[in-house]
Image (cartoon, rainbow, N blue to C red):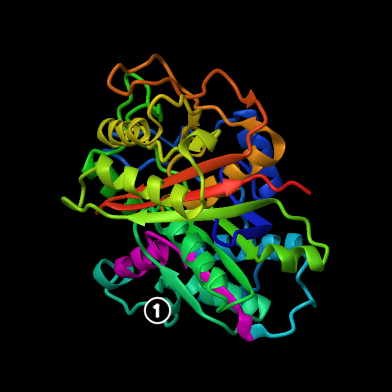
Amino acid sequence: MRRACAVTGRGAVSALGQSASAFVRAVLSGEAAIAPLEHRPAGLRLTAGAPIRGFVASDHFSERDMSQIDRFTQFAAVAAREAWREAGLAGQIEDPSRIGVFVGTANGGIDALEHNFARILVEKVSPRPLTVPQVMSNAPAVRIAADIGACGPVFGLASACASGAHAILVGATFLRAGLIDIAVVGGTDSCFSEGVLRAWDALRAVSTTTCRPFSAGRDGMVLGEGAGILVLERPERALRRGARIRGLLRGGGMATRASGLLASDAGGMADAMRLALADADLSPEAVGYVNAHGTGTESNDLAEATAIRAVFGSHAVPVSSTKSMIGHALGAAGALEAIATIAALEQGTLPPTLNFLAMDPAIGFDPISGGPRRTAVETALSNSFAFGGANVCLAFSRHVG
């Protein structure tokens, strides 16, 4: 096994709670955030979503700050503050140049972008002066770096729905290479502007009912939003300073078999899982849980199920999709799902797949359903797959000690 990374801090802003502890408690209990959308734009097929309700930016930011950062950056900054507090790193930084921040996003500052396009095209007035910093895809990483005083590598990543997982693995790569001592990693997205809703509705990828990953009768994904942030450091450093280690990122894999911008390729998904297992020095039989990408679309779920069967063979690994609870948070999905996976290992509880109706013979397995499953698991994989064939798999282990 190459050097593992210790997870010492977690932060979350999600539709199931605006803290990591609230999010974890709800996910491991099998609670649902997906509900009929209020104030839904007219003419849409989609009816449900998992927006973040009750997030009040002024509770966290000054009026000046709110004029500079869009909603997706606000989510990330709040989650990062929580992760940094949990890691107990305030006042313990000797060299800020050894801290890196890596944050993924699919949409970027889409809320500000839409608002200012309306000003330009409808109201025929100039955009607001701070539009550019609001919409920048690297704004979350920059804001987090400013908040914690990071002076090392700080940048954003974009790979659609794999952005958050990519950011985690890129940050871990910098850490394992000895280029930094602390990596603040994760993903964020705000997904309920009218333009985003209409674009996904036009793509016909969203459900007209609810999210049913791997189930017979599934008809598409449901949008979510939020942010998930992790603090990573080398285990020996964490132990030396007495930090609580929530889990270990053992390794990861990235693979692409791009056959089209929208194609789901089982081969690339399987490649990413095999690379993650090899990087973590794990056999398929050692894996006790897979947190699936599990969007609830016909083609993506079928491709992922095919990949899981190819990698695990006769090993009936438990599988579930937390998107059935919180929807698809796009660039934040992989980070929120990483937090859920770490918690599943730490607490010995595997989250269920909600809304499961019946087995689809083409899928070939039943995901965990009917409620959470209490079982001790040592290792798990978390899958994140994206349009364009961007496939990422993260391998986590329970920390013992």
**Residue 39 visible somewhere in the drawing:** yes
Could you tell me how many numbered marks the image carries?
1
- Three-letter residue code for mark 1: Val
Q: Is residue 163 above or below residue 139?
A: above
Left or right of 145: which side holds 275? left
Residue 113 drawn in magenta: yes
Residue 345 drawn in magenta: no
The crowd level at tag 1 (other Cα within 10 Å; few <14, some 14-19, many 20+) is some
Left or right of 289: which side holds 121? left
Q: Measured from the top left, where is residue 68 in percent x and y?
A: 52, 76
Task: Single out the residue that lies furthest toward the left.
Answer: 259
Q: Dividing the image into 4 quarters, which one contains the N terminus? A: bottom right
Q: Quadrant of residue 75?
A: bottom right
Q: Quadrant of residue 136?
A: bottom left
Q: Residue at (29%, 37%) from the top-left corner?
A: 300
Q: Is residue 125 above or below residue 400?
A: below
Task: Single out the residue that lies furthest toward the top.
Answer: 358
Q: Measured from the top left, where is residue 29 in percent x and y?
A: 65, 29
Looking at the image, which is closer to me, 109 or 337? 337
Q: Secondary structure at mark 1?
A: helix
Q: Measured from the top left, where is residue 314 in percent x and y?
A: 40, 24
Q: Measured from the top left, where is residue 374 in percent x and y?
A: 67, 25
Q: Residue at (52%, 45%) from the top-left corner?
A: 337
First to last magenta residue range: 97-118
Residue tagged 1: 132
